[in-house]
Amino acid sequence: MPKTIFQKIIDREIPARVAHEDEQCIAIHDIQPQAPVHVLIIPKKHVARLGDATSADQTLLGHLMLTAAALAKKLNLANGYRIAINNGPDGGESVPHLHVHLLGGRALGWPPG
């Protein structure tokens, strides 16, 4: 299976504006932001999509959520933010590598799509 763009970023084959990195994930600023703040939190372990995660990924999934919350604080999103995970073509998934979108910096409408 060829590397996804996210795996190439994790492997430093493609540059990215990194907002956070630790042993389990990397967070980068989206190159096509949909809000003033749009960060992608990407696990270093390849999981194609949330629907493919297993109980063995439970700790990793929790880490992604806590990292998103910590980044929201760091990026001054005190008025609120949205967390989104796209799963499959109808869910808006464009890269088959699980990632969490952190969006904020403006009022976000509902429904989102």
Image (cartoon, helix red, strand yellow):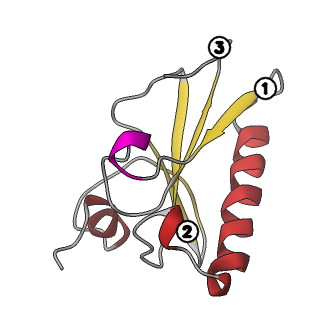
Per the picture, the main secondary structure of the magenta-coloured stretch is: helix
| Front one among 90 and 101 | 90
Is residue 43 visible in the rendered image? The answer is no
Residue 25: assigned label: 2
Mark 2 Cα shell of 10 Å, populated few (<14), some (14-19), many (≥20): some
The tag earlier along the polypeptide, 3 or 1, is 1
89 within the magenta span: yes
Residue type (three-letter) at the residue carrying disc 3: Arg
Report the number of discs: 3
Q: Position of residue 33 (x, y in %)?
A: 42, 28
Question: Where is mark 3, residue-wise?
Answer: 106
Residue type (three-letter) at the residue carrying disc 2: Cys
Q: Marks 3/1: CA distance?
A: 8 Å
The tag earlier along the polypeptide, 2 or 3, is 2
Question: Where is mark 1, residue-wise?
Answer: 80
Q: Point out the stretch of residues depicted in magenta.
A: 88-92
- Which residue sits at x=65%, y=14%? 106
Dot 3 and dot 1 residues touching (CB under 8 Å): no
